[in-house]
Amino acid sequence: MSLVNLAHVCSHLQNASKARLGLTSIPVSKLHVNLLIALQREGFVSSVTLGGTTPPKPFFLQSVSAPEDTDALAQRLQSEPWAAYPRPESAKSTQTAQIPEVSVPENPARRRLWLGLKYWNNEPVLRHMQLVSKPTRRIWLTSEDLGKISRTRQSSFVRGLTHPGECMFLTTDRGVLEARECVERRVGGMALCRTW
Amino acid sequence: MQGLVMLIFLEPRTSAFRLMHRTTLDSLLAHSQLPRSCRPRRTMSVCRPARCLFARCPTGSLPKASHPSHRSFHTTTPRAARKRRPHYASIKADDLQLLNQAAEKRFPTYDTSETALLEKKYTPAQIAAIKAAESAIDTKDVITQGQMRTDPWLLPYYDDLAETNPTTDFAEKLGPEAIPGKKTFREANDVERDEAIARIASENMAKLYPDGVPEGELTRKQQAQYNQALEAALTQAALDPRATFTSSNPAAVAALADPRHSIVQPDLPRLENRMARQTRRSSEDEEEDPRQKRLSLYMGWTKRQMRDIRTKTLVVHGVTNQTRMGKIRSMYYLTVAGNGDGLLGIGEGKSVEPEEGRKQSVFAAIRSMRPIPRYENRTTFGDLEKKIGATKVQLFSRPPGFGLRVQHLIFELCRAAGIQDLAAKTPRSRNKMNVIKATWEALAGQKLPDEIARARGKKLVDVRKVYYGGSVH
């Protein structure tokens, strides 16, 4: 597991944000998937979808029904507003129906991870992303180190999180977690990247 | 060592000496024999255990350093202990009673007339919700901990729902169900029309002259005013829909002129015209620079506010323009302007006349003033970095009392903006102009934590505003 690909992902996300792209793709690996899901949990990216070489159809477009059906549904909802909520007994069936179809190629080499990038007030939400551990020098941090780092102090030669809204992601035995989450759960791990 | 033993045996009669643990004495002697650097930090000052010898302290208690009346082995005077004050005042039982009274007086419970009024407006479920919400918050807490919001997203007005603000609130609307009785109209005939016009005109005149129409001989000016008012009242009455239409139901006729029944939104309230105000003021004053006048018109500030702006010219150098006629020398100025309370601007000026160029830069700086977000009105929100050309400026937020440990140009900018705690680095080029520009852009381009949280879809709570009634400094 080299971190070279992760370094490429970091640079690519910075470049894509600078270019104001709405959707971009990165190569798939378990580390990338877990990290990007952690980024999504922190609100840096809007969506993480497994797909092929072409971008997946937006969920919104996939779930849009014909206008006649929409009219019928609106009329029905007007008379029975409770129909908007799924019925408890049919919760399972509706859930399976709601998952949109995504075509993932059989060949793993052709799979890509598609990310929705976020912008707010005409500024990218993710503007800076860089590696902490390097391919030639991994950095392992304890929860005590992370406590200091998340309080803006330097520890184990890792600078504190001093930028406003800065986050650091670590890979731990509980999955990829944010530094503050690690402090909360008292777990340490290998630092992956810092983002703001 | 000699002196120490002497001192110990000089006062053998003190009760403390008799009560003293043998271990204390042992440790004291052991520590005092060690060189200074080898002693543990806690007991580095010999006076602490030694003071225990002479103090009348019970056997079990630890030696305390806060009794300056006792002798110490130090020749230097001990530093007075910092006076510890609690961060929040403790409330006595009597005051608590007063607090209860104050809370009851300021936030009284609904009486029957008020509940009757509420029942007119709200459904029983809504009233239950209101009551549940009000009972969830202790009114004492509102008095002791409640405070005005200071965050950037606070509403521009207090949420007093009893009043409508024509600028921020929707205008009150009335529908046809508000009109009792029949709602049919017909076109008025000439007699009815004249009658209505006369009635409406007299109503309008009563509005224009609330104290009654002036009687007796009128001056020419008064007469002209009166004629004008009469004309306006008649015109308005002729245009009034009540003159054109009539109905057997007087409520329906009244609804015609009621703006609450109109589908057209009422005009926004007329604010005092800024341009008119400015021209009036400058006409009273003595002759001043036309640029200054234009600036004050642009800013809309009072003269006093304008005078409080601090400006300082930081960069001056000569520049030359090479033409085929020869070199044209002029002076370049870069000035910073700020009000010392979160506004900062920079401006450039260039002219053949030195004074002219300086003025240009000063006015440009004042015109370009932008708000600088400051954490606790003293430092930046986190670390900032900005690169312009080959110049990179890094600004680091610092704790209270740190001061401005920055280079002179950044220092002047911080002082003008009212920043008190900051550290800075200019690791690359230190070109003066670029340092100033980069610092200004870094300071003005800060993102607030609330904004970052919103962008990420997170909820942000400032816990310093929550604990101890928000009175944490």
Image (cartoon, rainbow, N blue to C red):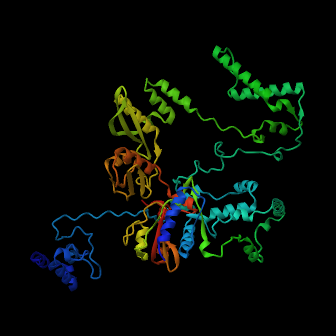
- Direction from residue B358 to residue B273 in the image, left or right: right
Look at 56% across and 62% down and name the residue there. B456
Between B47 and B428, the one nearer to me in the picture? B428
Number of labels in the image equals: 0
Say if residue B414 shows up in the picture. Answer: yes
- Direction from residue B287 to residue A19 in the image, left or right: right
Q: Quadrant of residue B327?
A: top left
Between B43 and B119, the one nearer to me in the picture? B43
Between B160 and B361, the one nearer to me in the picture? B361
Say if residue B101 shows up in the picture. Answer: no
Between B378 and A137, the one nearer to me in the picture? A137
- Direction from residue B330 to residue B133 in the image, left or right: right
Look at 81% across and 37% down and name the residue there. B256
- Direction from residue B13 to residue A54 in the image, left or right: right
Q: Quadrant of residue A88?
A: bottom right
Q: Position of residue B320 (x, y in %)?
A: 34, 33
B12 in relation to A48, above or below: below
Look at 39% across and 50% down and name the residue there. B419
Look at 34% across and 50% down and name the residue there. B429
B125 in relation to A108, above or below: above
B219 in relation to A97, above or below: above
Q: Position of residue A116 (x, y in %)?
A: 60, 63
Q: Position of residue B80 (x, y in %)?
A: 26, 63
